[in-house]
Image (cartoon, rainbow, N blue to C red):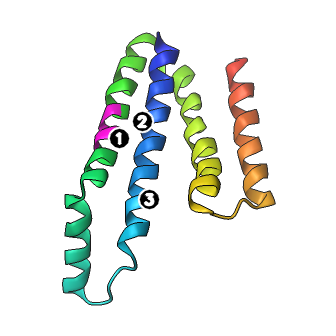
Amino acid sequence: MGYFFIALTVVFTVVGQFLIKWRVNEAGALPAELHGKLSFVWGLLLDPWIILGFGSAFGAALCWMLALTKLPLSQAYPFTAGTFVLVVLGGAWLFSEPLTMMKLIGVGLIVVGVVVMGFE
């Protein structure tokens, strides 16, 4: 059950990041003047999709607490690195962010690191 809660933690974290990124992209550029910045951020905070993104992050935190009731932190935490892999790949797919060779190597190193730690 602990690994199920870790998987939910990763999924909720990634979904929250994608929702927030999507809405920030839709909002446009950050204004230069202070009043404009405050209005910009306030508008984002009131956006229902941003609120859902924060809710997703909160759901991830709840699942993480449940995971830690089943597994030691040193065993559970490496699996949260899956968020890095999914965000890099999802960012390229959903937001046309560049997927460079260095990013792919980094993702590969993360995966290798998690696999190595899993054999401890």
- Amino acid under disc 3: Lys
Determine the residue located farthest toward the bottom in the rendered image: 33
Q: Distance between the residues labelled 2 and 3?
A: 14 Å
Q: How far apart are marks 1 and 2 (CA)?
A: 6 Å
The residue under the point 72% across, 36% down is 111
Does residue 45 lie above or below 37 as drawn?
above
Q: What element carries label 1?
A: helix
The answer to the question of whether label 1 and label 2 lie on touching residues, with beta carbons closer than 8 A, is yes
The answer to whether residue 105 is left or right of residue 34 is right
Numbered circle sitting on residue 57: 1
Q: Label 3: which residue?
A: 21
Q: Give the range drawn in magenta.
A: 55-59
Majority secondary structure of magenta residues? helix
Q: Label 2: which residue?
A: 12
Residue 16 is situated, as x and y percent measured from the top left of the image, at 40, 45
Mark before the other along the chain sequence, 2 or 3: 2
